[in-house]
Image (cartoon, grey):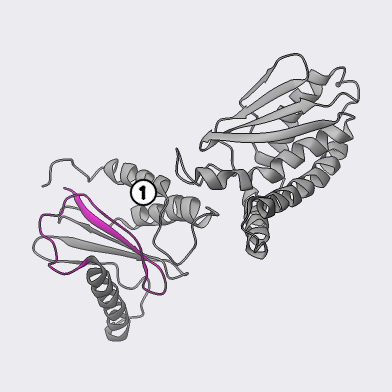
Amino acid sequence: MADAALFEFLHTEMVAELWAHDSDPSPGGQKMSLSVLEGMGFRVGQALGERLPREMLAFREELDVLKFLCKDLWVAVFQKQMDSLRTNHQGTYVLQDNSFPLLVRMASGQQYLEEAPKFLAFTCGLLRGALSTLGIKSLVTASVAALPACKFQVVIQKS
Amino acid sequence: MTVHNLYLFDRNGVCLHYSEWHRKKQAGIPKEEEYKLMYGMLFSIRSFVSKMSPLDMKDGFLAFQTSRYKLHYYETPTGIKVVMNTDLGVGPIRDVLHHIYSALYVELVVKNPLCPLGQTVQSELFRSRLDTYVRSLPFFSARAG
């Protein structure tokens, strides 16, 4: 993969651009920008989901797909693996990254906490898109307690 | 051997960051004026040094020293200036200043989407990493020399 800095700079600009053009400061407007970012991530995730997996047989069950996300997808995009994966075995998975590359340069603690969600929206979409290509419908949300650690919660939608 | 303080300026003279570790005497003027004085002086010395140089210049102005302290200077092609005052026992520290620029400023400020360039750095992470780094330098001793 190309130099990680290129993706980081591009991502930074995407977030900044969406916020600059969004003159509606109300929570409704914020949500619009977050969902645009998430949508972008979704389409990128769908494409990565097609391109990355090497063997079909590896995905025997849902947990394998999640493991693939934590290992291969994360390494391809962020040059590191996810730090932990937990599940309640009933369709909810919590993926934890203790030093998320898009947040790691910002702060180490509480500073900038309210801005952090903007930088996670694209990645939530990325996860949702990759899962969708692999046949799993889901809802992905992210939360940050203290930078740069963050958690992505994946809830599988049973249709 | 010790480090007294550190200034970081951008190309327009904005003081991006200032930290001090051992400074026994203040300048007696408000901080804003002190930064302007420092920047103006550096600007003048740089052009003086290149004009009056009897040989072709390579790196340009590197440092000056007085009977009590030494001021080290490092400038990047983008106009970022790192200025560190240390005591006299310290030799050339160009690589240290370069590290402050590349591993701290570029990594934690330029790459931080929430730090607008051209303004004083607000990032706590930058401040604490810089502090840790300076304290870990071999010529920094906790006791002021």
- Name the residue type under label 1: Arg
On the image, which quarter does residue B31 sit in?
A: bottom left
Q: Residue furthest top?
A: A89
| Residue A125 percent location from the top left of the image | 75, 41
Q: Looking at the picture, tell me which residue is in the foreground, A32 or A77.
A: A32
* Segment tinted magenta in the rendering: B1-30
Q: Mark 1 lies on which chain?
A: B
On the image, which quarter does residue A128 sit in?
A: top right
| Residue A106 percent location from the top left of the image | 50, 47
In the figure, is residue A136 to the left or right of A102? Answer: right
Residue B3 visible in the snapshot: yes
Element on which disc 1 rests? helix
Residue A58 painted magenta = no
Residue holding disc 1: B127
In the figure, is residue B55 to the left or right of A52? Answer: left
> Within 10 Å of the Cα at label 1, are there few (<14), some (14-19), or many (20+) other Cα atoms?
some
On the image, which quarter does residue A64 sit in?
A: top right
* Residue at the (75%, 13%) spot, across then down: A89
| Residue B74 percent location from the top left of the image | 35, 64
Say above or below: B39 vs A74: below
Q: Looking at the picture, tell me which residue is in the foreground, A44 or B101.
A: A44
Residue B91 visible in the snapshot: no
Say above or below: A2 vs A80: below
In the figure, is residue A128 to the left or right of B34? Answer: right
Q: In which quarter of the image is the C terminus of chain A?
A: top right
Q: Count numbered badges in the picture.
A: 1
* Residue at the (49%, 57%) spot, across then down: B115
Q: Quadrant of the N terminus of chain A?
A: top right
In the figure, is residue A96 to the left or right of A45? Answer: left
| Residue B63 percent location from the top left of the image | 25, 66
